[in-house]
Amino acid sequence: MAVHLVLLAGGRGTRFWPLSRRRRPKQLLPLLDARTLLRRTWERVAPLGRPERAWVVTAGDLARACRRELPELPAARVIGEPEGRNTAPALALAGALALAEDPRAVLAVFPSDHHVADEPAFRRLVRRALRCAREEGALVTLGVTPDRAETGYGYIETEGRAAGGEPLPVRRFVEKPGAARARRFLADGRHLWNSGTFFFTARALAEAFLTHAPDLWEAVAPAAAAFPGPRFARRLREAYRALPAASFDVAIMEKAARVRVLPADVGWSDIGHWISLGALLPERAGNRAHGELVAVDAADNVVVDTEGLTALVGVRDLVVVRAGGALLVCHRRRAQALRDLVAALAAAGREDYL
Amino acid sequence: MAVHLVLLAGGRGTRFWPLSRRRRPKQLLPLLDARTLLRRTWERVAPLGRPERAWVVTAGDLARACRRELPELPAARVIGEPEGRNTAPALALAGALALAEDPRAVLAVFPSDHHVADEPAFRRLVRRALRCAREEGALVTLGVTPDRAETGYGYIETEGRAAGGEPLPVRRFVEKPGAARARRFLADGRHLWNSGTFFFTARALAEAFLTHAPDLWEAVAPAAAAFPGPRFARRLREAYRALPAASFDVAIMEKAARVRVLPADVGWSDIGHWISLGALLPERAGNRAHGELVAVDAADNVVVDTEGLTALVGVRDLVVVRAGGALLVCHRRRAQALRDLVAALAAAGREDYL
């Protein structure tokens, strides 16, 4: 039962503007060190499988950049989706590809733009999750043990409380809660953050799709059967033309039987916006900074400037980012709302900055 | 009685960092349009005299840049001081040079880094001031009619209230006042802002120096006598070696007899810092900006960015400037205190940004 590592690398997002652009989204940015988040993700999970069996599912126009980041992988296994359709089609495609190659394949699926502080512990948990997927035929996910009443994440409610590092049955998936609800979730010990990682045999995945979203599976299966032949690309385009957008959580995980969540306390962050990135950057005189910073009576700011020196005087709670000719100065409580700004740029016809 | 226009262009200052640098201070910056403030000053006053009789007194290492800005002037008449010694030595030098050239010269002295909105009205006032200087042998200055209780300027208290556009006797010069005192000055109608402009005959100036600061005059006279010969530069170096630093206001204007001030209401600004510059910049959606700006819920900011696009989200009362590889984000109430920042840069050995 060979492990097929699957990296989901199709995200776009606007929350790291101006560093991120359409053609260079978050997973392709070196946000934490000299490596892109995609490269860091690959190096984190590489010990768990072999590159010849790995898959990357990304957007068509990002495939070349992903291949450059992951030269270990055979180029054909970096699949460019003709159009973004959220995670359910991407996972159906990966599952069908793996199943066509090896009926006994087991998949380990990872977002390519998250951070994990304790990588050895993370890999131990992944191995535990894979064992559960193999032995029980379950759909398994890692659920991050919350350390704060976060309202920016989805939650997974478990049956019973976490104990002994065993996978737990899932009662339900919960969308981003309000503040009061998030505080109850944190207190009750039964709620975990949805990490977007998945572990299952290709067979169990196929069964789940055929039960809960058969159209999706049947749409991508002909393309998968043609891989890596000359008809693959055309069949993939045909398949995606009619595919609805759907999240894998909603289409499959919330409905399937035998769903398990393994509590994970590994220093995880989805690096969702500049503020959460800031928490991972080096501290400089009370600020968090990547690049050269001089601060006079300035604290609690996040600065990312790889183009020169930033000087802050008498300011607090700002996000300051300089990249690619553009400069962002944003209050920290607005860091999750850069979509408005990017929309304003688009409305102003500033394609050169998108 | 030929007019000798004198531009004082030796200022350094740190208040326009990062746009201003040691070798490119405020008067050499195009802060308001494509022209430097020095160039704007020259074009404002050029109708009042002839370039062959004009003088520029600046710092030795800025002389070449000043000559580039003012190609109309004979190069030798842009004098580079060996060291900065404030305004009194600069004016003694200009006066001695003019007197040596023409015993009947009359001088019109201007800072080279100020703004005047109504230039024709300004020139009418300068002509009136020059007439007073010629006819009465007075030392004349323009005093700006205040429109707010500004604490950042020096004031001139007149004898009697301004009326009829006539020069008034001066009771005293007042250093920058506190807020309450500034409000009284504004209310009493007898206080004008010190504009740093001066008008006098070379003879009256020589007399005033010889009465109140004879050492200064006697120090620079041998250099002036050698102008424009081969010994001028060496004599100037010798003269400045022993010269004390002194402001012309303190050394002469506060002490001399026959000092007159002509009230001026011409839209004057000394452009003392980023906030006062902001008041002269175009308005963009509630902000003042030079360069490309996109603002989302952002107002009352001053942005100067000639290197790309600046985006502001959810911020107020900031100064944001990008120039020469450096980026400044400063609260508006700290815009007058950039000296601390520049000192911090110097302490950190960042000569590349000074």
Image (spheres, coloured by chain):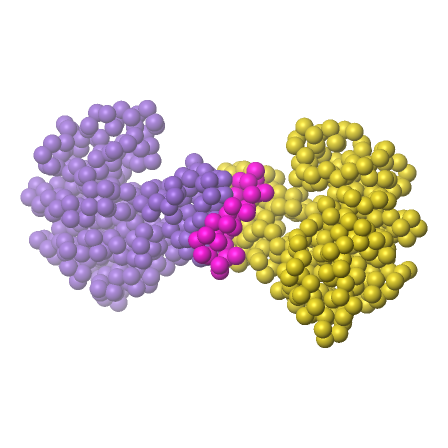
Chain colours: A purple, B yellow
Task: Tell me if residue A212 can be seen.
Answer: no
Q: Residue furthest bottom?
A: B230
Task: Tell me if residue B13 can be seen.
Answer: yes
Of A230 and B264, the residue lying toward us: B264
Q: Quadrant of residue A163?
A: top left
Where is residue B184? Give x, y as percent: 73, 28
Q: Quadrant of residue B165?
A: top right
* For residue A350, above or below residue A331: below
Where is residue B120? Give x, y as percent: 84, 51
Q: Quadrant of residue A139?
A: top left
Q: Residue furthest left?
A: A135
- Tally of marks: 0
* For residue B342, above or below residue B149: below
User: Looking at the image, which residue is at 9% across and 45% down?
Assistant: A131
User: Looking at the image, which residue is at 44% across and 38% down?
Assistant: A317
Where is residue A254? Give x, y as percent: 23, 35
Q: Residue furthest right?
A: B135
User: Looking at the image, which residue is at 27% across and 57% down?
Assistant: A39
User: Looking at the image, which residue is at 74% across and 66% down?
Assistant: B223
Judge from the rendering whether residue A320 lies leftward or rightward of residue A197; answer left or right. right
Q: Which residues are magenta?
A: B326-354
- Is residue A349 on the magenta stretch? no
Judge from the rendering whether residue A152 lies leftward or rightward of residue B215; answer left or right. left
Judge from the rendering whether residue A227 lies leftward or rightward of residue A320; answer left or right. left
Where is residue B64? Give x, y as percent: 66, 67
- Is residue B333 on the magenta stretch? yes
Of A1 and A145, the residue lying toward us: A145
Of A136 and B135, the residue lying toward us: B135
